[in-house]
Amino acid sequence: MSDAATRLARALRSLDGLSIGDAFGEAFFSDPTTLAPRIEARVPPDPPWHYTDDTIMAMSVVETLEQHGRIEQDDLARRFGQKLLRDAWRGYGPVTHQIVSAIGRGGDWRQLSAAAFNGAGSMGNGGAMRAGPIGAYFAGELETAAEQARLAAKVTHANIEGQAGAMAIAVAAAWVAGGAGDAAGLFPPVLDLTPPGETRAGIAQAAELGGGIDVLTAMVTLGNGLLSLSQDTVPLALWCVRHHLDDYRGAVDRGGGVRRCGHAGRHRGRYRGDAGWGTRRARGVAAGAGVAVGVHAVRVGT
């Protein structure tokens, strides 16, 4: 295969992985009274498993890479908008839905992204969710992967934290796809290329956390995605990759375990009260499965 075809094949493999993690976790949003026994027994969810906006937006990332060989932000924004207008109810968060639907109607992504959250920009985990294929595409080119992930995230995440999470995941995927050896070597390059801030601090903490603990303990230490933020999701996802680099099922199970902990419903900011807290937690921790497995999947077949 040509170099471009080889790069694309790696990106598609990562896309497959993150879509599986995304759909696997999404399938656990059900009645908690019946869900808990299934989790304890390790019984997979009943089919079909439906992927979410995270996979849809990652598809746009891969299409942009295929077309340009890099992240071309205007084209990526256009693809985001077109896909949302065709399929608006895939679970887009309220702010993402607002930004991307406005892009689809001809709005300038630069202004829309920068204006989010009263001008602070989004620090959510969505940019990280779709960054695995970028790292896979730029296998072994860690600095390039980080910069391209930053560009991709900036279309919807003007805040540096949202970009930092995407950069960290892309670097991890590029390191894995570039022929990584011992999993213990994962964290140093990720930390080198992640900008300072809360996300990087959480990753540094994840690097010090051993693998001999259960996922719930890791969640208490590293975050559980409750706030759907980069800094609340990416450290735990990378911890899952570090300790299950050659164990796809383990990565899915632990990454999916992050997602299942809410035990109920979907969150996109539409719920309130006690039930709302549970659904926010469920949807917030959702990205862990897709992020972790999107990085891990590039290991398959390499």
Image: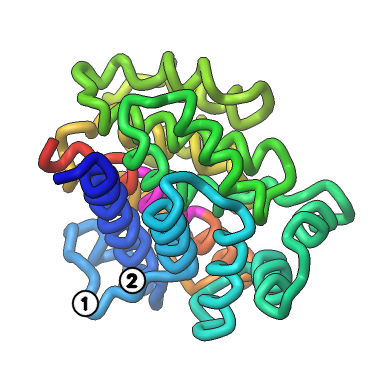
Main secondary-structure element of the magenta-colored stretch:
helix
Outermost residue to the right: 118
Does the magenta run of residues contain 288? yes
Residue name at image x 18 percent, y 58 percent: 42
Determine which quarter of the picture holds residue 28.
bottom left
Q: Farthest residue to the front: give it.
A: 2
Camera-side residue of 151 and 130: 151
Q: Is residue 163 above or below residue 124?
A: above
Name the kind of residue labelled 1 in the image.
Asp
**211 left or right of 237 in image:** left
Residue linked to disc 1: 46
The reply to whether the C-beta atoms of the residues labelled 1 and 2 are less than 8 Å apart is yes
Q: Which mark is residue 271?
A: none
User: For the point 37% across and 61% down, which residue is it?
Assistant: 22
Badge 2 crowding class, 10 Å Cα cut-off, few under 14, some 14 to 19, many 20 or more, is: many
Q: Which residues are magenta?
A: 285-292
Q: Quadrant of the N terminus?
A: top left
| Left or right: 113, with 66 as reference point | right
Please say whether residue 186 is one of the residues in the magenta stretch. no
Please indicate, yes or no, whether residue 226 appears anywhere in the rendered image. no
Disc 2 marks a residue whose amino acid type is Ala
Indicate the quadrant containing the C terminus: top left, top right, bottom left or bottom right.
top left
- Pinpoint residue 164: horizontal percent, then vertical percent: 60, 34
58 is higher (above) or lower (below) than 137: below
In this view, 62 is above or below 296? below
Front in this rendered view, residue 221 or 123: 123
x, y percent for residue 196: 66, 21
**Residue 98 percent location from the top left of the image:** 72, 72
Q: Residues within 10 Å of mark 1 (few under 14, many from 20)?
A: few
* Mark sitting earlier along the chain (1/2): 2
Q: Which residue is mark 2?
A: 27
